[in-house]
Structures are given as structure tokens and as C-alpha cells.
Image (tube, rainbow, N blue to C red):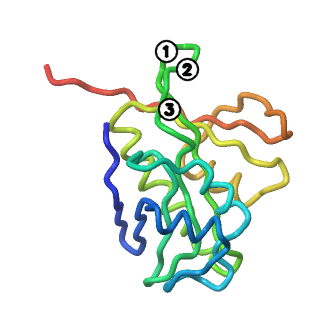
Amino acid sequence: MVLPEVVDTARLRLPLWDAATVAAVRAGQRLGGWHPSFPRDDDVDAAGLWQEGVVWGPRSIVVDGEVVGSLGFFGPPVPADDGIVETEVGYGLVEEARGRGIATEALAALLAFCDTAGVRIRASIAPDNAPSLAVAARTGFTEIRGTNEDGELVLVRPAAPVHHGM
């Protein structure tokens, strides 16, 4: 399954990062159209996951022409211990963009592609990060696998069954 390079929703644009974006994020530079608080530390961390030509990487969250955050997968899906392909997702917004359903809308848009392919998604979220936990709950993360080495809750969104033609 290939994710599109740009995913559009009713009010958001989610373009895959390119080399110029990653270089600017890593260097702490600000490109045109970026919110004054972007990139955040988490965005810089996400830049470390970027690989040329891999659509399962970081993307910008763009609202009204302004980059207000990022979301993306930590790499292409791979088979888990139970044989179901899965990958991890991360997301975040500048403080001024929070509380408007933006992260939920962005994540739901990407997850629709995962459902089509039968990819299970996990997210690691600090137990005191109520807004992020709420986004995960609203987008179907229902299983808790425990905690990771950083003390974050590891949540899982079950893969949708893939239906093949008869």
C-alpha cells in the first residue's frame, strides 16, 4: 500500500516532508508558511525518522496555509509477533493550534489509508498527556499494551479487516 504524498481533508493539508523541509527542521530554521512556534522539539525528533522516498514518514499539518504541527509514521509497516503488519504513529501541534480538533482530523485522515491496507497502528503517549490520549481514543486506539521504556502508554488501534473481492 502506498500512502499519497499529500493527504487533504475538509480543512487540512498533510504533505509528506521533503529534503528541504527536513533540513530546515533539523537546522532550527523557519520556512515561509510556518507558525512562529514550529518546529517544536518533537518535530526535530521526527526529522530523524525521515528517509528519502519513504511515504511512511513525517508530514506537516497545514491549516489555512500555515504549518502548525506534524504527524507521521515511524517507518513502513512490518509484521508484528502475531503476523499483522503494524507501525507507530506520532503527532503534535503548536500550542496555539490545540483544542480545535486538528490533530484528530489529521490522524483520522491518515488512518483511513491504514484501514484500507489492514495495517495496525500503535502510539506511545505519556500517561499525563490527556489531550493526546483523547485524540487516540477518538481515532480508535482501544488496546493498551502496557508501557515502553520511557514510561509512555503503548496504545494500539486494531487493523481493519481487509476484504478481498469474491
Q: What kind of residue is marked 1?
A: Gly
Q: Residue at x 34, y 47 (%)?
A: 3
Q: Judging from the image, what secondary structure is the residue with disc 2 in?
A: loop
- Residue at image mark 2: 80
Q: Are marks 1 and 2 in contact (CB under 8 Å)?
A: yes
Q: Residue at x 52, y 40 (%)?
A: 75
Percent x, y for residue 100? 59, 75
Q: Residue at x 31, y 42 (%)?
A: 2
- Residue at image mark 1: 83
**From mark 1 to mark 2, how far is it between C-alphas?**
5 Å
- Residue at image mark 3: 120
Q: Residue at x 71, y 52 (%)?
A: 133
Q: What kind of residue is marked 2?
A: Ala
User: In which quadrant of the rendered view does residue 102 lie?
Assistant: bottom right
Q: Which is nearer the N-term, disc 1 or disc 3?
A: 1
Q: Are marks 1 and 3 in contact (CB under 8 Å)?
A: no
**From mark 3 to mark 2, how far is it between C-alphas?**
9 Å
Q: How many marks?
A: 3
